[in-house]
Amino acid sequence: MSGRAPLSKRALSTSPSMTLGISARAKELRARGVNVVNLSAGEPDFDTPENIKEAAKRAIDSGFTKYTAAGGIPELKKAICEKLRRDNGLNYDPDEVLVSCGAKHSIFNILLAMCNDGDEVIIPSPYWTSYPEMVKIAGGKPVFVETGETGFKLTPEGLRSAISRRTKLVIVNTPCNPTGVVYTGDELRALGEVIAEHGIYCISDEVYEKLVYDGLKHVSLASLSPELMDLTITVNGASKTYSMTGWRIGYAAGPAEIIRAMDDIQGHSTSNPTSFCQKAALEALTGDQESVERMRREFERRRDYISNRLNRMGGIKLTKPQGAFYAFPDISEFLGREAGGRTIDGSCAFAEELLTRAGVAIVPGAAFGHDGAVRISFAASMEEIEEGMNRMEEFLEGLR
Ligand code: PLP
């Protein structure tokens, strides 16, 4: 024994992922025979489309199983450039694109490539649970801007108030996990003006871009002006659009200098994203897109159902999700009440009691920096959602 603590300060300041934790607990209860309705998932419940699976099988059978270029195969980078041009109005060259092991990995690479110790990264709250942890691991400092009073959207004033001399980046996530809000072009333009005025950089996380409802159109921040194109790193991936969460393919597009630094970091950490998964992602981007719209329509149907049910539950307040596959209802009305002798003192207690007493797994808002709400995923079958809502309604009626 050397007597030295085995863990780094970096490791000690990192919290475990609460979202993955709840899913694991729900699966564990299920394995023990408990009838659990799992509405905590952060991934589509559909199978990966057949044409994509076939492309991966063909790649394996043809021996495409070795190292590739660390930052992705040229034909996939080219397909990503075409996709960004076609869908997002963004003109990137292949040397401005990096393929990584999921969008999470893309974001991590950006932060490692751009943050010096103590650099500040502005994160609108509620936020996707991994942003602050990744910022901290990269040596940066998360700076939160509360958006609960502004319809869960970052406003130009909110952004301006958080900018300091140390600000390096702001993270904008549209459509947003966990709130389901979708920024309009005008809202992004207004944020873009503040970003350009201060010359800070922006990570635009667009992984849910294809899951928007009510006829809305997703807008990419970088497409709004040449200045924003220079200051934005656009992140997207195959996970949510093509139901490919396990394949681990994401990508980033941005200024060549930043992408090159990310490529160097990736080259010394994971090396290339899995070779045959890149071939599958190539098929996803260039093949038939019919399954994307089919899944989107089904999510919209579920979104309508879950919103109606939640709105009918007394005490629940919902900002109707316009994108992604989560509802983020406010449950603060129920805080301070009791369930079986235990006081519900926050979203964690609420989620724990709902799981233990009613067998419904959801994620506490605390995981997203917002204790007055919970995240309910509608990436589950209609039957499960219906049963989950029945049980939740009964649970709420029992709270005194
Ligand atoms: N960004 C957001 C907002 C997410 O919700 C997720 C996954 O849950 C990701 C990025 C990462 O996606 P992946 O790493 O599977 O591509």
Image: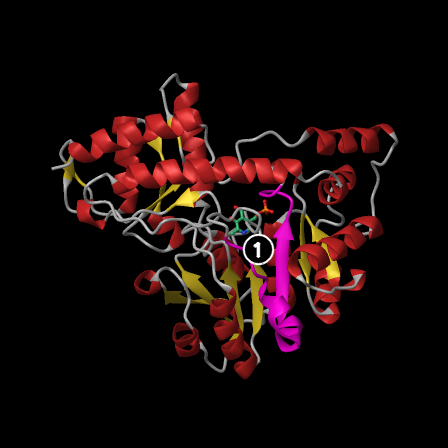
The answer to whether residue 265 is left or right of residue 170 is right
| Mark 1 element type | loop
Locate residue 207 relative to residue 256 in the image: left or right: left
Outermost residue on the left side: it is 400
Q: Position of residue 362 (x, y in %)?
A: 36, 37
Q: Give x and y (percent) for residue 257.
A: 74, 71
340 or 153: nearer the eye?
Answer: 153
Task: State the image coordinates of residue 226 (x, y, percent, origin top left).
Answer: 66, 76
Residue 193 position, x and y percent, is 52, 78
Residue 70 in view, yes or no: no
The residue pinned by badge 1 equals: 206
215 left or right of 353 in image: right
Span colored in magenta: 216-241
Instruction: Tell me if residue 46 comes above or below residue 160 in the rendering.
Output: above
Q: Residue at x 42, y 28 (%)?
A: 382
Q: The C terminus lies in which quarter of the figure?
A: top left
Identified at 35% across, 28% down, the residue is: 386
